[in-house]
Image (cartoon, rainbow, N blue to C red):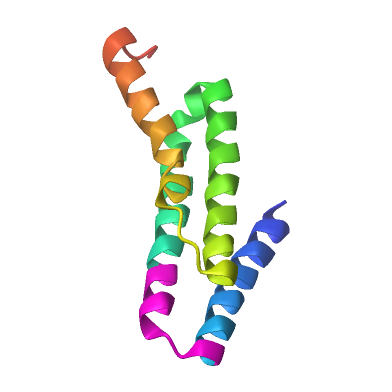
């Protein structure tokens, strides 16, 4: 599984660089790398949601959805920011639930 994630990361970065070499659009490369960092950061930040397993599984699905939206932006030049930032909803929902119900520890 870890090897698949590493391959996916390398493939995404390679696709971004290849697209830049073909089109020479620096702005698009920088936006792509910034959004790539956002998706990776949201993936790591989602570890706080691990305490509630159904919410964590939804978060994983939304991370894959965001990664797909990033690849779609690289390949088709259509940017869907709502799809890329969708994993943020599970983190916000978890924090709201923690404030309302409290910690179980």
Asked if the stretch drawn in magenta spans residue 26, the answer is yes
Q: What segment is highlighted magenta in the picture? A: 22-33
The image shows a total of numbered marks equal to: 0
* Drawn side of residue 75 relative to residue 43, left or right: right
> Measured along the vertical axis of the image, is residue 77 above or below residue 102?
below
> Going 52% across and 50% down the picture, which residue do you hit?
66
Magenta: main secondary structure equals: helix
Give x and y (percent) for residue 30.
37, 75
**Camera-nearest residue between 58 and 6:** 58
> Going 31% across and 20% down the picture, which residue do you hit?
96
Toward which corner of the image does residue 71 lie, by quadrant? bottom right
Q: Residue furthest top?
A: 101
> Measured along the vertical axis of the image, is residue 82 above or below residue 35?
above
> Going 62% across and 71% down the picture, which residue do you hit?
10
Give x and y (percent) for residue 53.
57, 23
Toward which corner of the image does residue 28 lie, by quadrant? bottom left
Q: Which quadrant: the C terminus?
A: top left
Give x and y (percent) for residue 37.
41, 62
Asked if the stretch drawn in magenta spans residue 101, the answer is no
> Going 39% across and 24% down the picture, which residue do you hit?
94
> Measured along the vertical axis of the image, is residue 94 above or below residue 105?
below
**Camera-nearest residue between 56 and 74:** 74
């Amino acid at each position: 599984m870890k090897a698949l994630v590493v391959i996916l990361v390398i493939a995404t970065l390679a696709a971004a660089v290849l697209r830049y070499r073909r089109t020479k659009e620096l702005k698009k490369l920088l936006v792509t790398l910034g959004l790539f960092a956002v998706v990776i950061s949201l993936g790591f930040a989602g570890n706080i949601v691990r305490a509630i397993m159904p919410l964590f599984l939804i978060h994983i699905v939304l991370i894959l959805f965001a990664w797909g939206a990033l690849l779609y932006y690289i390949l088709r030049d259509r940017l869907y920011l709502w799809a890329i930032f969708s994993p943020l909803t599970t983190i916000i929902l978890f924090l709201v639930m923690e404030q309302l119900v409290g910690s179980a520890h």
